[in-house]
Amino acid sequence: MKIVAINGGPRKGQVSKTTMMLEAFLEGCRKAGAEVEVINLREKTINMCIGCYTCWVKTPGVCVHKDDMKDILDIRKGADVEVWATPLYIFGPTAMFKNFLDRSIPLYEPYIVEKDGLCAHPPRVADQVSDIVVISVAGFYELDHFRPMSDWLHFMAGRGLGRIGAEIYRSSAEFMSAPPLKPLTDKILEATKKAGEEYVRDGRIHEDTMKAIQLDIMPDQETFLKQANAFWDWDIDRWKKRRAGKQS
Ligand SMILES: Cc1cc2nc3c(=O)[nH]c(=O)nc-3n(C[C@H](O)[C@H](O)[C@H](O)COP(=O)(O)O)c2cc1C
């Protein structure tokens, strides 16, 4: 199985909870025998779609922009599964990730067909549509914050832009780098790795694994609010002191 992972997070390394979750998942996939390739969108030059439709009319399948997206589309063509990883930004994916999707329109035909009662563009190559595993992390406490993005992804899949194979959503994600919570974070990452193994082996993530991924890193919303706001107080104060130190 060839897996192509697209990371739409702007932050690097262990500061990025998207990357932490993605790496754990892919470790599990590799362990189960999958071949994995990772594309970090933040390292790529991908211009914004300018809506010229050159890729649909003048040079079918080829975008007017000469940038890294061409190679990315070529890599995607060989994927059995794509992992779409993005932090939750304003209840959706990052702009970088959305731009990646916009720039994927060369993979589709301009012609419009009826699909399950609604309009859709068919893929240029029929078997180009791969299974998609979504990984996203959010700052807020409740998993409900992922609902708009999950609904949007399912609607998009219904229009033929992919098949959602699994969704991994991790809320309260910023607490995953809090040293006192390391034992819980390790459990989450271990479960995420197991999810990768299960997905490659069984084509799905088991319910108990998903429960472990989504374990309450904070015991309740009240504690979450207290701890999160204490962090912001500490961080703002730290910078205030630094600024004051520079001035004196
Ligand atoms: C511009 C911006 C928008 C965000 N919007 C949301 C949001 O709508 N809901 C939420 O729970 N967290 C939101 N967050 C918090 C991030 O999802 C959270 O910090 C996450 O850990 C970032 O992923 P990363 O660690 O991979 O960078 C936002 C953060 C930024 C910078």
Image (cartoon, rainbow, N blue to C red):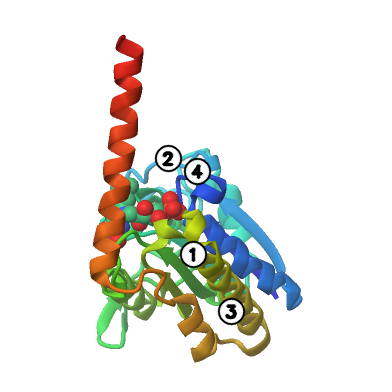
Type of amino acid at the residue the image marks with label 2: Asn
Residue depicted at 54% across the width and 56% down the height: 19
In whole angstroms, how far apart are the C-alphas of marks 3 and 1? 15 Å
Residue depicted at 29% across the width and 18% down the height: 244
Instruction: Report the residue marked by disc 1.
Output: 84
C-beta proximity under 8 Å, tags 2 and 1: no
Instruction: Report the residue marked by disc 2.
Output: 47
- Tell me if residue 51 can be seen: no
Instruction: Report the residue marked by disc 4.
Output: 42
* Helix, strand or loop status at disc 4: helix
User: Residue 119: percent from the left, percent from the top?
Assistant: 27, 76
* Helix, strand or loop status at disc 3: helix
2 or 4: mark nearer the eye: 4
Residue depicted at 53% across the width and 39% down the height: 67
- Tell me if residue 183 can be seen: yes
N-term mark: 4 or 3: 4
* Helix, strand or loop status at disc 1: strand
2 or 1: mark nearer the eye: 1
4 or 3: mark nearer the eye: 3
In this view, 19 is above or below 196? above
**CB of mark 2 near ligand 1 (< 8 Å):** no
Locate residue 96 relative to residue 18 in the image: left or right: left
N-term mark: 2 or 1: 2
Locate residue 170 relative to residue 179 in the image: left or right: left
Instruction: Report the residue marked by disc 3.
Output: 195
**CB of mark 1 near ligand 1 (< 8 Å):** no
